[in-house]
Amino acid sequence: MPLLVGRRVLLIITGGIAAYKSLELIRRLREQGARVRCILTRGGEQFVTPLSVAALSEEKVFQDIFSLTDESEMGHIRLSREADLLVVAPASANVLARMAAGIADDLATTVLLATDKPVLVAPAMNVRMWEHPATRANMATLAARGVRRVGPAAGDLACGETGAGRMAEVADILAAIADMLAAKALLAGRRALVTSGPTHEPIDPVRFIANRSSGKQGHAIAAALARLGAEVTLVSGPVAIPDPPGVRTVRVESATDMLAACQAALPADVAVFAAAVADWRVAEPAAQKRKKQEGAPPPTLSLAPNPDILATVARLETGRPTLVVGFAAETENVLDNARAKRRRKGCDWIVANDVSTGTGTFGGDDNTVHLIGADEEEAWPPMTKEAVAERLAERIALRLEARR
Ligand code: PMT
């Protein structure tokens, strides 16, 4: 049985050499039973013809917001209303920027601004454009609004350079579409607790001890669990990224505050501890700013151990979540250390990631993890933190279902 029978995809083809792959995408979507309507932007028209798009989709192709015929036959609002999913493939740097800024200056961006349907983008551009801070910021804004992304892949680019920027393969875009359209409320009625970000341990009113966690991994997990229908409380240390949509976010500063917020969020069916919690705090933070004394030696900080939040929750005698998942951030002997950490802290699964210098795990967009349980271990390929979150959320849903 084809995967997408009766599902309606609105495909927006913007300018880029990868637009030719969109023709193949239309063909594959139709093979899977989806109805595909297409918007071709002016840029997209430079790479594929309206005729080939119309022939493959067997639908009228929409190009112009000011076309009276289009507006009388099918208003731009109806175009989005009559779709289950909007897919932008290829998504140029320009369209991502206009989406992030909320600009509606052509049919594609107007529909994207007017829609309340899920949106998937498949970016395709030169590696430098992809890595430019502006594109990164635009992508982060869109992700925070719930826009999903597939790719880009790394490799040789049409511009002659090598790196990330190639549009994801059609099979991967198709898989992401199937995933989004099939997204069932696997976790409906379940409660989830997720920790994320660093903790700040005060030295005095202006200084603190912290670490490099950005919250990207933990926030993505909270969002992925919410997309599967869970009622999620995210307890987050201080981060610069927005709260994920559809999630109750509790912001805290220190490990002690984080423990209290976690305890208040229980009971939960699943708890995922992705926060990088400081193991120690300053035993006696100064009430006033510590002053530099001329000629005096630098002060020595006396540290006290912080509560272990994961271990506290995992070892609860009553009210322990059915599934407790920790993370292990390791810089050496990653797997052995993670296995030992899982046993020591008493969690069911631990997600091991290598955070040694050069991996970019702290703060970056990608992660390479191992999922470790008492009798199971899986090595996951390198992927985005969002993809790690999606996969982990699915695993959690399956495990909770098995224990129902
Ligand atoms: O935030 P990002 O920039 O996206 O980076 C993601 C990440 C690298 C922070 C994340 O993937 C990760 O590995 N999180 C765990 C970081 C960590 O503190 O690991 P750890 O090995 O020191 O701690 C093991 C586990 O115990 C973790 O689940 C941690 O949340 C928990 N812990 C640790 C100490 C403590 N006092 N209380 C805890 O709950």
Image (spheres, rainbow, N blue to C red):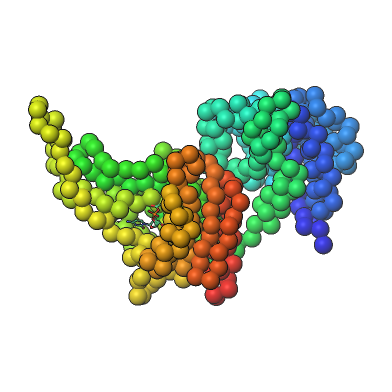
x and y percentages locating residue 272 in the rendered image: 45, 59
**In the displayed structure image, the side of residue 116 where residue 267 appears, left or right:** left
Quadrant housing residue 241: top left
Q: State the quadrant of the C terminus.
A: bottom right
**In the displayed structure image, the side of residue 67 where residue 353 appears, left or right:** left
**In this picture, is 76 found above or below 236?**
above
Q: Residue at x 40, y 62 (%)?
A: 341
x and y percentages locating residue 247 in the rendered image: 47, 52
Q: Residue at x 18, y 44 (%)?
A: 301
**In this picture, is 361 found above or below 112?**
below
Front-lying residue, 377 or 177: 377
Tell me, yes or no, if residue 167 can be seen here. Answer: yes
Tell me, yes or no, if residue 219 can be seen here. Answer: no
Front-lying residue, 337 or 54: 337
Q: Residue at x 77, y 33 (%)?
A: 19
**In this picture, is 2 found above or below 88?**
below
Q: State the quadrant of the N terminus.
A: bottom right
x and y percentages locating residue 82 in the rendered image: 74, 46
